[in-house]
Every structure is written in structure tokens, then in C-alpha cells.
Image (cartoon, grey):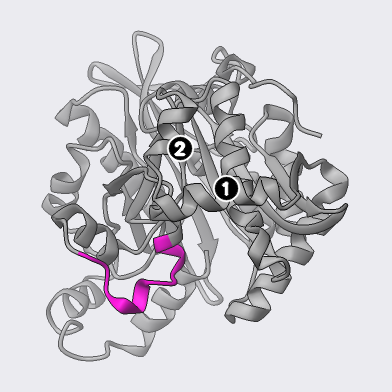
Amino acid sequence: MMPSKRVSPSKFDPDAPAAPVRSGAYQTAITSDPIDAAWDHFLATTPGGHHVQSSLWAQVKAPLGWQATRVTVYRDGRMVAGAQVLLKSLPLAGSVAYVQNGPLLEQDDTALARLVLDQLHQVAKAHRVRYLIVQPPETDTLVVPLLADIGFGPSTVEVGPTATVRLDLAQDLDTILARMKPKIRYNIRLSDRRGIAVREGARQDLSLFYQSLAATSQRQGFMPYPESYFDAMERWLGPYGSFQLLIASYQAEPVATILTVPFGDTVIYKKGGWWGQHRDRHPNEALHWAAIQWAKSHGYRYYDFEGIDAAAAELVLQGDPLPESMRQSVTRFKLGFGGEVRLLPKPYDYLYNPLLRWTYRTIYPKVAGSVALQKLRDLAHKR
């Protein structure tokens, strides 16, 4: 079972050894250690740091065929920047790779950003990467224009969300509740009156969570990750307080579940499952309200719903209504909790074969693209 209190970022040992190499004012290191406590500490304590960049998350992805390499940069012996690359081997030769929510820089410094990107290219060459995707973190102000300068272009491959909705937990709970849409607020209160109870889950509840996720996938027609994936999440993230299950029940009957990942100053909603019963008791609203209260009581600053439809986000920011097709969508449900809509950096990609790169940038927008290119894109989709 996860710790009852928030685990401090100092749980990740910032003094873990590294192997830096001097490069001007900075020192760089390229490592592939399974667990990198110093890097994870840097992520947990630096604005924009995200659990998907952590060495713990790399261990979660390893059974799916992804292997991690990290670029870290030091100044005066202190880590100031870096990026974790996840790589997957191709059937014949080489590999594909992606960087999600990275590179992360402690401060805006163009020379530092260029250095990290140059090191990423070195990693790509060493691992014979054919196709690399980079999606910078939300705090980025420098990397996107630099990516364009070195030949990257906008990608249509989804690496991570490009829009989200986030609640600021610095507000008191009454204010948070008051800023929700009236229907969501009403349903939260109704769920309590109609007997929905929410409890924290433990490791033995993983199978229960997966059953609810499988039931949801059958209704909505998507294929969930295997149960072993979530078992790995609990095994690697749980000891650091970064894995949280909540179970909603009615009269001791499990009705719905959600999985959140607390990391740094944010609790991120990761996945949810619902058996489809007791709709009129609104267990899903109750679960998120319980997660919000848990996050605030444990000292986190934000509750992030991790992803909404980007087109819907742009409409909201422009003050325009959502189309009728989104009236019953997950995006509308998340928006109902009254958080701030945020647009996130989009992914950029790079093909290391010059001919394919030229085709991708000049011909591909007009035609379907080559078979080889499509295979690379398909592999990148299988994150």
C-alpha cells in the first residue's frame, strides 16, 4: 500500500554518483542506469519536471520494449538540465526513440538548451535511431524554436497530451467546489447522499482496478495496456508515493476506480475504470472529488486531469462553446471541474535518413508517404 503521507522529493538521493564530461562551462553525462536517483530528484524539484521523464517510469516502460538513456548536464557540480530518451529496437536494424516532457532546463539558457539537444543527437547516433520525437515540457520557452533550427518539424504522432485542465489547490475546498460547473457540483453532493463511499486502494486492489478498466474498454472500444503494466507501475512508483488507487463502492460493491500519480507538486489523473452500474449515484464525480481532497490534504499544489481534446481546449480559451459532438465527451466531463485549461507544447520529430526526411517534409503532406516511413510512424505510435 502506498504511504499515507506525501513522500518528499529528497527520497530521490540527489547525491547519487554520475560520470560527467566537461563541455565549456558545463559538464555532460550520458547514462543508462536502471534507477537514477539524482535525475529523479532533479525532476521532482524543478518546475516542469514530470514522472514520465523519471528513471522509475523507464522501468515501467521496459517490459513493453522501451529502454532508457539519459542526458544530464551539470554546472559547478550541480545538475541543471537533462532529458530521458526511450528507445525501441526496430525488427531489422536501428531503433525509434522519443522524449516526452523533455528536455528539462533549470533556467532559460539558449546555450544550455543547444547543448542538451546536441547530446540527444549523439545518443540517437550511438543507438542508430531512425526516427526521434521530442515533446518539450510545459515550462519550455527555448527548445521549440531550437528544434526547428536543427531540422525538426511538427509531428502528427501523439507522444503525450497537447492540452489539459488543471486545478489550483492553493484555493480552499469550498472555492474549488464553487468554481465547478453546477451539474458536477450537484452530482458530487448527490453521490454522497446516495451512498457512494470512496477508499484508498492497496496493492491487492490492482486486479479490481484492472477489471474496471477492462469493462470500460469494452464499452468504449479501446485496448488497454496489459495488467502487468499497472503492476509494474505500482512496483516502481509505489515505494516513492507516486502511485495512488481510489475505489468507489456502493453498499460494499465496487463501482468505479481511478489511478493517480503524485509527483513533484502535482497529482496527475492517469486512468479510470467504471463497471457501468449505478450511473445515477455518480461514482466517477465522487472519485475525482476524493482525489482532489487527498491531493490538497497531502500538500500538493495542482490536480491535473492529464489530457483533453486540443481542439476543445482552443475553443474554451477563445470563449466559444463546444460542438454538440462533445456534449457527452470525457473532455466535457473534465472541464466540468472548473480547472484552468492549458495548451501544452506539441511534439516535433526528426528522421535521420536524409531522403526520408526530405520526403517527409516536402512530399508527405501531399501524399500518404513511403512504406518505410509509415512503419517508423507505426512503431512510434506503440508507446
At a point 23% along the width and 20% down the height, the residue shown is 24
Magenta stretch encompasses residue 329: yes
At a point 66% along the width and 55% down the height, the residue shown is 283
Please provide percent x and percent y for residue 147: 19, 50
- In the rendered image, the vertical position of residue 354 relative to residue 318, given as above or below: below
- In whole angstroms, how far apart are the C-alphas of marks 2 and 1? 9 Å
Please provide percent x and percent y for residue 365: 17, 82
Q: Which mark is residue 188?
A: 1
| Foreground of the two, 112 or 41 | 41
Type of residue at label 1? Ile
Residue under pointer 2: 177
Please provide percent x and percent y for residue 28: 37, 26
Please provide percent x and percent y for residue 354: 22, 71
Q: Mark 2 or mark 1, which has the lower sequence index? A: 2
Q: Are marks 2 and 1 in contact (CB under 8 Å)?
A: yes
Type of residue at label 2? Leu
- In the rendered image, the vertical position of residue 199 relative to residue 9, given as above or below: below
- In the rendered image, the vertical position of residue 51 relative to residue 229, given as above or below: above
The range drawn in magenta is 321-332
Secondary structure beneath disc 2?
helix
Dot 1 alpha-carbon crowd within 10 angstroms: few under 14, some 14 to 19, many 20 or more: many
At a point 62% along the width and 61% down the height, the residue shown is 65
Magenta stretch encompasses residue 16: no
**Displayed quadrant of residue 156:** bottom left
